[in-house]
Image (cartoon, rainbow, N blue to C red):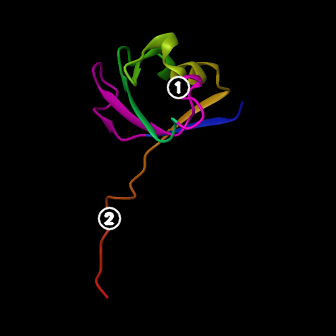
Amino acid sequence: GGDNNLASPYEGEGRVGSTIHYTHSLRWSTDGKYNHGVRQGQITIVDPNKSLVEQAWLENGQTKEANETWQRAKSAESLSIRRLRCFASASISSI
């Protein structure tokens, strides 16, 4: 249950072939005790009239049932994507 938040910049405007690149830190069952952390994947829009979980998800070379992030998204009460712009206006100042 609860929100499953994925940070995402996206290419295109929901058109077929548009790609959403996401980042998260969900642990997969195949990770073991120490082999987990920040992950990245992508969602390719195959039908803009369908829900996000009905698009093509690819992460760590895995799609459909083998993609544990997609499995969690599919069974989530809600799914949201948030765009992070933290590096867009970052500046470094010297002391």
- Residue at left 50%, top 41%? 37
Residue 69, numbered circle: 1
Residue 21 falls inside the magenta stretch: yes
Q: Position of residue 70 (x, y in %)?
A: 52, 21
Tell me: residue 4, above or below residue 54: below
Q: Secondary structure at mark 2?
A: loop
Tell me: residue 89, above or below residue 69: below
Q: Please state which amino acid type lies under the numbered disc 2.
A: Ser
Can residue 51 be seen from the camera position used here?
no
**Which image quadrant is residue 94 in?**
bottom left
Can residue 23 be seen from the camera position used here?
yes
Name the outermost residue toward the right. 1
Question: Mark 2: few, some, or many residues within 10 Å (few <14, many ≥20)?
Answer: few
Q: Position of residue 15 (x, y in %)?
A: 30, 23
Identify the residue position indicated by label 2 in the image. 89
N-term-proximal mark, 2 vs 1: 1
Quadrant holding the C terminus:
bottom left
Give the distance between the C-alpha atoms of the residues marked 2 and 1, in whole angstroms. Answer: 30 Å
Q: Secondary structure at mark 1?
A: helix
Count of picture labels? 2
Nearer the viewer's eye, disc 2 or disc 1? 1
**Which image quadrant is residue 49 in?**
top left
Q: Position of residue 5 (x, y in %)?
A: 56, 39
Q: Which residues are magenta?
A: 8-34
Quadrant holding the N terminus:
top right
